[in-house]
Image (cartoon, rainbow, N blue to C red):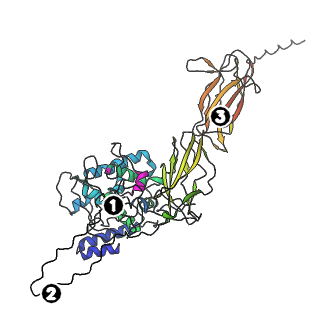
Amino acid sequence: MAAQFGRRLRKGAATTAVAALAVAALSASQGPGATADDQGGRPATTGAETSPDAAAGTGGATGNSPYYTDLPPLNSPSPSPTIGTPASRGDTATEAGIPATVLDAYKKAASELRSAKPGCNLPWELLAAIGKVESGQARGGQVAANGDTTSAILGPQLDGNGFALIKDTDNGAYDGNSTYDQAVGPMQFIPSTWAWAGRDGNGDGKKNPNNIYDAALAAGHYLCRFGWDLSTQADLNSAILSYNHSQDYLNTVLSWLEYYRKGTHEIPDGTGTLPSDRSDDNDSATVTPSPSPTPPASVKPSPKPQKPETGTPNPKPPTTSPPSTTPPSTPATPTDTVDHLEDAGTAKLTAQAGDAFTERVSTRAETKAGAAVAKVRIRFTIVGATDTTFTGGESVATVVTNSTGVAVAPALQAGEKTGTFTVRATVVGRSISGLDYTATVAERAADTLARTSDTALTCVPGGEFAEQVEVKATYDGKVADKVAATATLIKSVLDPTANDKGPYFKDAGGKTVRTLTGLETDANGLLKLPKLYADDTTGTFMLRITTAGGAALNVTLTVAAAETSSPSPSASPST
């Protein structure tokens, strides 16, 4: 940040510099405890887990692309609405204001996240702060009514020349560059991150990184993965660091977040202020180069030689070297050396519906000779008709291999759909064959059933049992919730067919029923059966309850005539 302050002072903006220092001091006092570690701000975990396309290899969502370092004014923003009021570019009112369509996109994204991931507590002001730092609120609100930017917003190509080295991952589909990736759109997503994080925020059926509604919603989901609660400072810091892997970036975003939280207002689209200072020290650069790669400049023809003046000797033509046609060579990256993927000891992947898988997919990147390749991005994709996701609700995660060449996927979270599906591992930036892992989601099961009461179940002929049967299901000693169960009044322990006499249930129409199907334990593993009735048959009867997973319980029912008390004999008269 010191370089940034220096630039401002050299420009003579002393007042702005003082304000910037004050705000920087404020954000420093709110000091992020997290540092820009190789987990993208997420607490270190076992294995090689990182956030999808995480900072360890790509600098988070943006690939560590340049960002605007301008800090907010020292004066508090005006919360009063000023939509439709002209504002001069560069004044405090414009700086505090957010273009109407852009502001609407931030608020709609935050509203959707409140429903989709209520535990995240995403404030729309955080999206506004990131949008300010990444693109100056879509270049001052240069957007159409549907949210599309009026022209593509692109960062510089990530060719390793002062930036991260990320070779093309989308064949130029998003950034128009089939050689290197570039950050795209008002929220500056790199293509490999947009491939899994992209969202349709304006309901037009497309996921367009150059649409502020789509980009804001994608940014919201990106910041809310891993179960982060952004109302806590530690998780807020981690989420921001995972977006761009820089401590200065974190401080800058926190400054704008605090500023917008104090109040802001709408301004007309296209009237916002575009910041001037960038983190790559290129004040004159913009984030809006042409979306297609610039063709090489044509060689200008040599000027036509002039006729020498009389008496002047012919000048000796200068010796010129023909332009080189050999393209500059680029150094090989670790990704270039990967020949194939190998399983790194993944155990059997099974889980019950609704549970987390205890085992995780583990993949090793190797050269042709079998040597491990570190710092390679491995993309894990869940394939098949399943509602299983990775922790955080995503179906795609990108993990960087560790020093032993191993990448461990985030934990899988089973949904309610049972059956098998595939987790596919591929190398980002290479077209070599992927590696498939088969996983299975089994139905919810119980291995033990027990009554919650030890009261004897008795009834008189033609009456009803006073107590309803209630049982608790467990699996490996833990509550077994939402487990399918069946209750049948059987003939005997040795003959499990349904009885045709004795106790019975009633259906909705009042008819006799001796088998109940479609039962399910509740969230606490409890199952309470309907009332039981008795016909005129007396004796001892058996109710059997079974569940998925093989748990079974026999409950004894007794139907007996009520006992009658005999009168006491009269006392013999005294002799």
Tag 3–tag 1 contact (CB < 8 Å): no
Q: Secondary structure at mark 1?
A: helix
Classify the position of the N terminus by image quarter.
Answer: bottom left
Which amino acid is tagged 3?
A: Thr
Which amino acid is tagged 1?
A: Glu
Dot 3 surroundings within 10 Å: few (below 14), some, or many (20 or more)?
Answer: many
What label does residue 392 carry, if any? Answer: none
Mark 3 or mark 1: which comes first in sequence?
1
Front residue of 153/249: it is: 153
Q: Secondary structure at mark 3?
A: strand
Tag 1–tag 2 contact (CB < 8 Å): no
**What residue is pinned by disc 1?**
134
**What residue is pinned by disc 2?**
313
Indicate which label's residue lies in the foreground, 3 or 1.
Answer: 1
**At which x and y percent is residue 552?**
70, 34
232 displayed left or right of 151: right
99 displayed left or right of 555: left
